[in-house]
Amino acid sequence: MDPNGYRLETQAIHAGEPSPRIGGAATVPIFQSTVYEQKEGASYHDIVYPRLSNLPNHIVLARKLAVLEGGEDALVTGSGMAAIATSLLAVLGGGGHLLAQDSLYGGTHNFVTEDLKSFGISYDFIDARRPETWGSKLKANTRAIYVEALTNPLLQVADHRAVAAFARQHNLISLIDNTFATAVNFRPLELGFDLSLHSATKYLNGHTDLVAGAVIGRGELVRKVHHLLNHLGGCLEPHGCYLLYRGLRTLVLRVRQQNASARAIAHFLSKHPQVKKVNYPSLESHPQHELAQTLFQGFGGVLSFDLNGGTAAAQRMIQRVRLPIPGPSLGGVETLITRPSQTSHAGMSKADREQLGISDGLIRFSTGIEAPEDLIEDLDQALKD
Ligand SMILES: *Cc1c(COP(=O)(O)O)cnc(C)c1O
């Protein structure tokens, strides 16, 4: 079967499946074994071992993810941070310099600012919305540029076409964290990005019961990351692979529902008298609204907003909602609500948060797959006097 000829929904089910099916099974069974018989004369490279990410459970995921996002190859990892850290080290190891977007996911921010130095790697932050400012940050040893599809929690949009073009022009490897968008909403490899990274903990799995990651992109680079992952050990164990495989098959349906619901909720909130400001790219008030429409098929399930009443009003609202679960994280089937100043960005000083535009009262909302009408009615009652 050539899976590339099919649409995304079909690929999510059929791409990468083993042929013939293993034991005739309609799904790929879990290979819960750490040892596989080795034939006399087999080479080192024929060893099948979970840490080497070469069980049928790893292979089906790699093939499916590569087809879904249009990459030559892919790899699953034990967490999103394993995918990100291993990829950055593989690309920059031995004295490279990195240009990184200035509003990164917290774990990535800490890895870049606290750990890269000890590997002989340096970095500079860039405003990824302003391509004219990047050239002056280049150094002789600059090897890579790193951005996120949509930033957390303000949903800012980098000039992704310019990032891919800048990387090509200056011989850099371009990496993007595509966790917030997924292949359903954004296809960075088709714009020319070299590697697309994911926290599969979020939308790819989608069921809030697994920590995993993924690396998708150019074959030679994915193999380089795979080689390093084999040594660093950040593999995904077979049962985790199975959960991700099961989640992936409904990715397209879930994300489309989340796109539509988040959009409806963002528009409802933007008209509500208690709401000061909503951050979501479908709103005309979003500073990169037009750019976002040319890049994305949908804007995902995450939005954020400030209330007129500030922090006290936000605390009251979080206490009064009935459906959203108060908690960090995002991308699952259940709606979550949180104040980033207390969770994802709690490690940052108040001054640094405010510099970025993250007030203490900012609410982040990760839309699940509940009926949007129920979610809107719930938000409405929580905002009543
Ligand atoms: C959660 C997240 C990560 C880290 O992923 P883990 O699976 O928790 O290691 C990286 N990037 C983004 C955008 C995330 O939301």
Image (cartoon, rainbow, N blue to C red):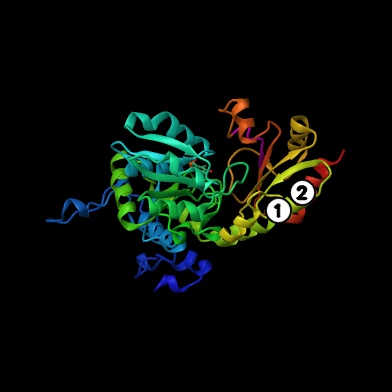
Q: Is residue 323 above or below residue 67?
A: above
Which residue is identified by label 1? 283
**First to last magenta residue range:** 337-343
Farthest left residue in view: 41
Whether label 1 touches label 2, CB < 8 Å: yes
User: Residue 364 at what x, y percent from top left?
Assistant: 66, 41
- Foreground: 69 or 127? 127
User: Residue 287 at what x, y percent from top left?
Assistant: 66, 48
- Foreground: 149 or 345? 149
User: Residue 189 at what x, y percent from top left?
Assistant: 44, 58
- Foreground: 138 or 25? 138
Q: Is residue 74 above or below residue 93?
A: below
- Apparent side of residue 159 relative to residue 14 in the rendered image (left or right): right
- Apparent side of residue 297 relative to residue 244 in the rendered image (left or right): right
The answer to whether residue 2 shows anywhere in this view is yes
- Foreground: 17 or 160? 160
Magenta-drawn stretch contains 246: no
Q: Few, some or many C-alpha atoms within 10 Å of disc 1 (few <14, some 14-19, many ≥20)?
A: some
Which residue is depicted at the point 69% across and 55% down?
Answer: 263
As shown in the figure, which amino acid type bears the numbered disc 1? Leu
Quarter-of-image position of residue 62: bottom left
Q: Which mark is residue 270?
A: 2
Image quarter (top left, top right, bottom left or bottom right) of the N terminus: bottom left
- Apparent side of residue 101 relative to residue 273 in the rendered image (left or right): left
The residues tagged by marks 1 and 2 sit, at their Cα atoms, a distance apart of 8 Å
Going from N to C along the chain, the mark reached first, 1 or 2, is 2
As shown in the figure, which amino acid type bears the numbered disc 2? Ser
- Apparent side of residue 7 relative to residue 272 in the rendered image (left or right): left
